[in-house]
């Protein structure tokens, strides 16, 4: 378990020799000016990683906010595009041709010239379509449209299936929901054994357990916010958390986790809170992000066929 300082400027080295920021801003369920403002505040606070997706319908806003910041007087350190890490994800696994076309469209929408990390958003579609879509990611990397390839919401069997296919490029990342209330140790252990970095989406459990007695107690002990405690838990497990907020003060707080270290006993206490809490809700083919969270069934594709 890592026992070190983490900063927004720090990076995690991947198995392929490239690296990604320790902490990314998630822009799920944001749109329009809300997305643009959140990304701007995050850049000003020191964030360098931004997690979008085709399904979020905000690749353009995220990219526009990044480009505007880089060209503005607010960019006092002379930050360049190469120092920014932009993630997007394939909305569905249908065919090689569809995936290849879709990746090109994401690059164009973002306006960033290339995508740093591109993920298969889920394992839905079946084995053949998953592997075809992965081939499209490999070719996008070869063509310079994408720097790093990875997957999201893949369970152990999906990861093993992909590795067994002997891909030219192995997945560098698996982005899953993981937090003390849903630890997914089967998946995280497999990833760590195979040098696949775990990105933790919903690391704050979508604020559903901020008043849990253990979270409240440990936040007081370490003089931090519940959000900071949860982000730090992810980091100390070696994960890359993607905290999401559209409030300036929360964006700053969630990235400011260098002042404390959770001791080993308290990490075990937090690990013991696991209740398989799935916070995401999903309805296919809807553009309304609010509907995704309020009217769908629990979205956990990690055990799909």
Image (spheres, grey):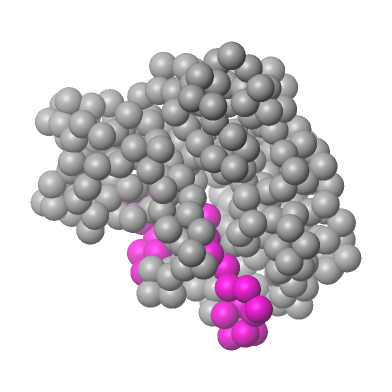
Q: Is any atom of residue 246 visible in this view?
A: no
Q: Is residue 255 left or right of residue 70?
A: left
- Where does the N terminus fall, quadrant-wise? bottom left
Dividing the picture into quadrants, the one containing residue 45 is top left
Q: Residue at x 79, y 54 (%)?
A: 103
Q: Is residue 143 above or below residue 299?
A: below
Q: Is residue 258 left or right of residue 90?
A: left
Q: 11 or 284, which is in the foreground?
A: 11
**Residue 25 image offset from top left, x and y in percent:** 51, 35
Q: 300 or 110, which is in the foreground?
A: 110
- Where does the C terminus fall, quadrant-wise? bottom right
Q: 206 or 163, which is in the foreground?
A: 163
Q: Is residue 211 above or below residue 73?
A: below
Q: 187 or 69, which is in the foreground?
A: 69
Q: Is residue 11 left or right of residue 220?
A: right
Q: Is residue 215 above or below residue 34?
A: below
Q: Is any atom of residue 103 visible in this view?
A: yes
Q: Is residue 73 above or below residue 6?
A: above
Residue 140 falls inside the magenta stretch = no
Residue that extends furthest to the front in the rendered view of this protein: 78
Q: Is residue 2 left or right of residue 89?
A: left
Q: Residue at x 62, y 37 (%)?
A: 81
Q: Residue at x 38, y 31 (%)?
A: 255
**Residue 204 image offset from top left, x and y in percent:** 40, 37
**Residue 150 image offset from top left, x and y in percent:** 59, 61
Read off the magenta span: 162-189
> So how many labels did they put on this image?
0
**Residue 33 image offset from top left, x and y in percent:** 69, 18
Q: Residue at x 36, y 24 (%)?
A: 253
Residue 172 falls inside the magenta stretch = yes
């Amino acid at each position: 378990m890592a026992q070190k300082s983490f900063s927004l400027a720090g990076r995690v080295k991947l198995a392929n020799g490239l690296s990604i920021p320790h902490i990314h801003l998630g822009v799920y369920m944001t749109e329009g000016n809300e997305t643009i403002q959140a990304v701007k505040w995050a850049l000003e606070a020191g964030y360098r990683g931004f997690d979008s997706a085709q399904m979020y319908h905000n690749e353009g806003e995220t990219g526009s906010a990044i480009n505007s910041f880089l060209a503005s007087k607010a960019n006092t350190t002379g930050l360049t595009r190469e120092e920014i890490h932009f993630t997007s994800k394939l909305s569905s696994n249908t065919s090689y041709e569809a995936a290849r076309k879709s990746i090109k469209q994401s690059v164009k929408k973002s306006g960033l010239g290339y995508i740093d990390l591109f993920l298969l958003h889920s394992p839905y579609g079946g084995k053949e379509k998953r592997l075809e879509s992965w081939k499209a990611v490999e070719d996008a990397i070869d063509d310079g449209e994408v720097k790093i390839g990875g997957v999201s919401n893949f369970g152990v069997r999906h990861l093993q299936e992909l590795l067994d296919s002997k891909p030219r490029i192995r997945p560098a990342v698996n982005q899953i929901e993981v937090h003390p209330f849903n630890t997914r140790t089967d998946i995280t252990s497999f990833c760590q054994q195979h040098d696949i970095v775990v990105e933790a989406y919903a690391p704050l459990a979508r604020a559903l357990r901020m008043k849990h007695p253990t979270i409240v107690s440990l936040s007081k002990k370490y003089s931090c916010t519940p959000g900071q405690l949860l982000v730090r838990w992810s980091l100390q497990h070696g994960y890359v958390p993607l905290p999401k907020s559209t409030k300036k003060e929360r964006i700053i707080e969630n990235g400011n986790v260098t002042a404390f270290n959770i001791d080993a006993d308290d990490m075990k206490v937090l690990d013991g809170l696991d209740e398989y809490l799935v916070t995401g809700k999903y309805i296919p083919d809807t553009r309304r992000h609010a509907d995704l969270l309020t009217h769908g069934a629990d979205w956990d594709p990690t055990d799909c066929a």
